[in-house]
């Protein structure tokens, strides 16, 4: 849902799939994240599908 929201609202993003890049999963765990998606943009990370916070990236 997050990916669709970003695409539909023409917000550019780079997708890193933890299934294809296991080192990315290690990075997220090291940072204390326990779920995906994690969106880095702005001053803090957005965790999960949060349209209210994603709108601020536009």
Image (cartoon, rainbow, N blue to C red):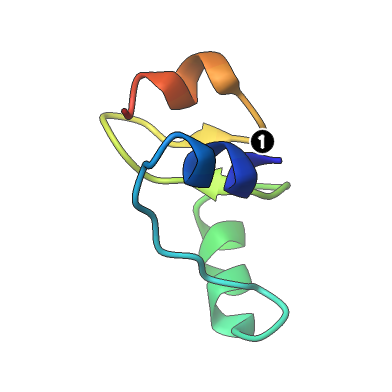
Q: Is residue 10 left or right of residue 30?
A: left
Q: Which residue: 54% across, 73% down?
A: 24
Q: Where is residue 9 in the image (x, y as percent from the top left)?
A: 44, 34
Give the farthest residue toward the top: 52
Callout 1: SS: loop
Q: Is residue 20 left or right of residue 44?
A: right
Residue 25, picture quadrant: bottom right
11 or 52: which is nearer to us?
A: 11
Q: Which residue: 26% across, 29% down?
A: 43
Please say if 15 is above or below 31. Answer: below
Q: Where is residue 39 in the image (x, y as percent from the top left)?
A: 47, 44
The quarter of the image holding the C terminus is top left
Q: Which residue: 33% across, 29% down?
A: 57
50 or 45: which is nearer to us?
A: 50
Please say if 50 is above or below 36. Answer: above
Q: Which residue: 61% across, 59% down?
A: 29
27 or 45: which is nearer to us?
A: 45
Disc 1 residue crowd, few under 14, some 14–19, many 20+, Cα 10 Å: few
8 or 26: which is nearer to us?
A: 8
Please say if 10 is above or below 53. Answer: below
The residue that label 1 is drawn on is 48
Residue 14, picture quadrant: bottom left
Q: Where is residue 30 in the image (x, y as percent from the top left)?
A: 54, 60
């Amino acid at each position: 849902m997050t990916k669709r929201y970003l695409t539909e609202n023409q917000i550019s993003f780079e997708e890193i799939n933890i299934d294809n890049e296991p080192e990315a999963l290690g990075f997220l765990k090291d940072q204390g994240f326990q779920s995906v998606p994690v969106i880095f943009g702005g001053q803090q990370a957005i965790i999960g599908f949060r349209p209210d916070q994603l709108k601020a990236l536009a």
